[in-house]
């Protein structure tokens, strides 16, 4: 069966059985968007107000910034897959709670396993710590970490600052842009390593 159809079915199945308490306060579930054949999966933390209204991740100011950075490396949303660790908006855009991250974890794990990206790009500390606990963003941003993640397996993780945090912080913004520029080279390196194996 076509991977696009399989991903749609996966998202539909998880959405139907979702019993999160966040459903009481959000407008809709935001599963993710993009290509089921993507080489890169971007993972944020949770939908915000705009995302909750539209059902599409990263459509606010941070999303526009992300789109601009994608354009600089000649990618668009059609080439990648974007999702969040939590698929429902927390009230007042608060940080997702550990139990909320845990309840949505199986959904995220299955998305990654189905898509099989060359690299998983974490956007922000919550996304990073859900895949690799006890890592400081300031220490690992812009580096590729090869990690055996429970219920997913071995994946390449690339940690980036969250676009929302970088948007209004000059030095962090430039760091994020610089780190973002490395993505095409990283993908090429991973593909070359796979050919050698």
Image (spheres, helix red, strand yellow):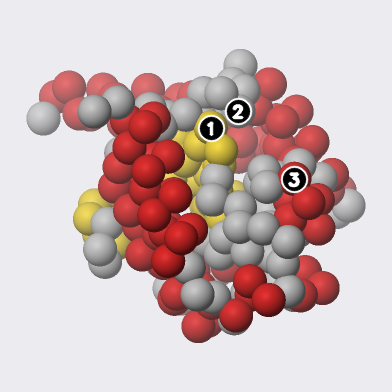
Q: Which is in the foreground here, disc 2 or disc 3?
A: 3
Name the outermost residue toward the front.
Answer: 16
Element on which disc 3 rests: helix
**Quick check: 104 above or below 34?**
below
Residues at circles 2 and 1 in contact by the CB criterion of under 8 Å: yes
Label 2 packing within 10 angstroms: few (<14), some (14-19), many (20+): some
The residue positioned 68% from the left and 76% from the top of the image is: 24
Q: Which residue is mark 2?
A: 77
Can residue 138 be seen by looking at this rendering?
Answer: no
The residue positioned 42% from the left and 66% from the top of the image is: 17
Q: Position of residue 81 (x, y in %)?
A: 51, 36
Q: Which is in the foreground here, disc 3 or disc 1?
A: 3
The residue positioned 47% from the left and 29% from the top of the image is: 35
Q: Position of residue 128 (x, y in %)?
A: 51, 62
Label 1 packing within 10 angstroms: few (<14), some (14-19), many (20+): some
Q: Which residue is mark 3?
A: 54
Separation of disc 2 and disc 1 at Cα? 6 Å
Q: Which residue is mark 1?
A: 34
**Quick check: 112 above or below 150?**
above
Q: Earlier in the sequence, mark 2 or mark 1?
A: 1
Element on which disc 2 rests: loop
Separation of disc 2 and disc 3 at Cα? 16 Å
Residues at circles 3 and 1 in contact by the CB criterion of under 8 Å: no
The foreground one among 171 and 55 is 55
Label 3 packing within 10 angstroms: few (<14), some (14-19), many (20+): some
Element on which disc 1 rests: strand
Residue 47 shown left or right of residue 33 in the figure: right
Q: Quadrant of the C terminus?
A: top left
Can residue 185 be seen by looking at this rendering?
Answer: yes
Q: Earlier in the sequence, mark 3 or mark 1?
A: 1
């Amino acid at each position: 069966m076509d991977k696009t159809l399989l991903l749609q079915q996966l998202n539909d199945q998880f959405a139907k059985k979702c019993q999160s308490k966040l459903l009481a306060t959000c407008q809709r579930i935001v599963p993710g968007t993009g290509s089921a054949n993507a080489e890169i999966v971007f993972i944020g933390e949770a939908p915000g107000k705009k995302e909750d209204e539209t059902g599409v991740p990263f459509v606010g100011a941070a999303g526009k910034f992300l789109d601009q950075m994608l354009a600089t490396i000649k990618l668009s949303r059609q080439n990648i897959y974007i999702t969040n660790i939590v698929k429902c908006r927390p009230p007042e855009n608060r940080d997702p709670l550990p139990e909320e991250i845990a309840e949505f974890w199986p959904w995220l794990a299955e998305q990654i396993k189905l898509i099989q990206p060359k690299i998983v790009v974490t956007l922000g500390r919550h996304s990073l710590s859900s895949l690799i606990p006890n890592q400081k963003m300031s220490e690992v941003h812009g580096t590729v970490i090869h990690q055996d993640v429970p219920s997913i397996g071995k994946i390449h993780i690339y940690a980036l600052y969250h676009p929302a945090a970088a948007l209004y912080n000059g030095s962090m913004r430039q760091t994020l842009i610089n780190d973002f520029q490395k993505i095409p080279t990283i993908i090429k390196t991973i593909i070359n390593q796979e050919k050698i194996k």
